[in-house]
Amino acid sequence: MEEKQFVVPGRYWHWEEDGRIQCDLCPRFCKLRPGQRGLCFVRARENDMMVLTTYGRSSGFCVDPIEKKPLNHFLPGTPILSFGTAGCNLTCKFCQNWDISKSREIDTLADSASPEVIAKAAHQLGCKSIAFTYNDPVIFLEYAVDVAIACHEHGLKTVAVTAGEICPKPRQEFFQYMDAANIDLKGFTERFYKNICGGKLSTVLETLVYLKEKTNVWFEITTLLIPEENDSDQEIKEMTKWIVDNLGVEVPLHFSAFHPDWKMLDKPKTPPSTLIRAREIALESGIRYCYTGNVHHEKSSSTYCHVCHKKLIGRDWYLLSDWNLDKEGNCRFCNTPCAGFFQGPPGNWGRQRKPVRLRDFQS
């Protein structure tokens, strides 16, 4: 049984005629009897209501480069305080954070902090923003929203790293408090989502369109390419064409490399050549900013002006080199705006990774 200070009433649920409670947070719509948990593990039925069982608890805090989220067009070079909880509302066989997202052990939640302490810590550590990451923040919506409110009061930006599997009403509340997001578009077929991820492609596409049309959230997209699963030229062409037609040409796209993990140990690592080819297809489709991840390739990690093609931001892994944007985020060579959220000169955090104990900031 969880410690009571970490259990809070959950939002987005209703009673079924048979006496079960249905969770309406994500399209899985888990129906719970007394004492049962949803697939995400952290939302449960207690005392005839839906509760979140991990409010104020985390699997750990770490200061990362913001490029690691990945976000290449949002406050480049700056440090970001990152944390997650436990559980997930998807069942991706290739999950590369499975020790956190699939945890059923409360011991995973080794650190605890109130929203105010998190905001205070991020501010004192010199971070410009905080990230909800490692596992999907939509499942701890109540905690994430409260943390975001506290961070905004300290002048900090908020970033959600999410798969976008969330229903319309909670989607509206959740993203109301986010300044930026990286959406994990896992593939571009319902088959892949159903068989490999336990989710729905249509829901993620709805989230992406919502972000574009109804919010001011800066967002970028990441797709992990898995050999012989979602890496065909045809699927990548269809995906990138959909992005251009529905989201526009300025949404940055990241292709990252798969490595065997959790329940998908039979697949080989993604060859760098696959990522390079996917990037070429995206550029041919009209996407202006496309990157490769989890491989060392300076050219495809850097940002270029889409008019004069000069290098705007050079990247060596997470270390920035060239910087050819003016104060307004325009190309210094031809004055063309670069899409993104830039505030003056870049940060110099580089590739540092700094674990943080939030208890050190308790007062």
Image: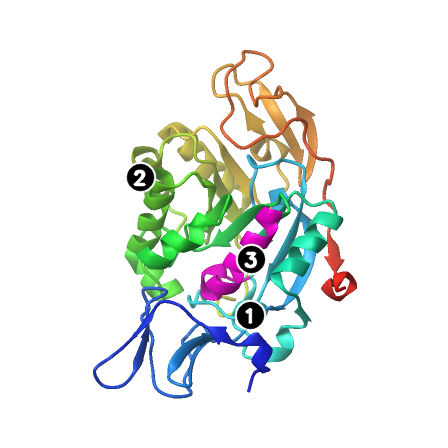
Left or right: where 57 falls relative to 220:
right
Left or right: where 213 falls relative to 360:
left
Could you tell me how far apart the alpha carbons at marks 3 and 1 are, in whole angstroms?
32 Å
When the figure is inspected, residue 279 is found, relative to residue 103, above or below; the finding is: above
Dot 2, crowdedness within 10 Å: few (<14), some or many (≥20)?
some
Which residue extends farthest right?
360
Residue highlighted by disc 2: 242
Q: Residue at x 43, y 79 (%)?
A: 44
Indicate the amino acid at tag 1: Tyr
When the figure is inspected, residue 327 is found, relative to residue 317, above or below; the finding is: above
Q: Nearer the viewer, residue 157 or 239?
A: 157
Give the number of the mark in front: 3 or 1.
1
Residue highlighted by disc 1: 55
Could you tell me how far apart the alpha carbons at marks 2 and 1 are, in whole angstroms?
37 Å
Residue highlighted by disc 3: 259
Q: Residue at x 35, y 36 (%)?
A: 247
Percent across and percent down for residue 328 are 57, 21
* Contact? badges 2 and 1 (CB < 8 Å): no
* Mark 2 or mark 3, earlier in chain: 2
Indicate the amino acid at tag 3: His
Q: Is residue 359 visible?
A: yes
Q: Residue at x 52, y 66 (%)?
A: 265
Dot 1, crowdedness within 10 Å: few (<14), some or many (≥20)?
many
Left or right: where 93 falls relative to 214:
right
Dot 3, crowdedness within 10 Å: few (<14), some or many (≥20)?
many
Percent across and percent down for residue 253 are 46, 39
* Mark 3 or mark 1, earlier in chain: 1
Where are the magenta residues, as a range? Answer: 135-153
Name which quarter of the figure residue 244 lies in.
Answer: top left
Figure quadrant of the N terminus: bottom right
Q: Nearer the viewer, residue 61 or 158?
A: 158
Q: Secondary structure at mark 3?
A: loop
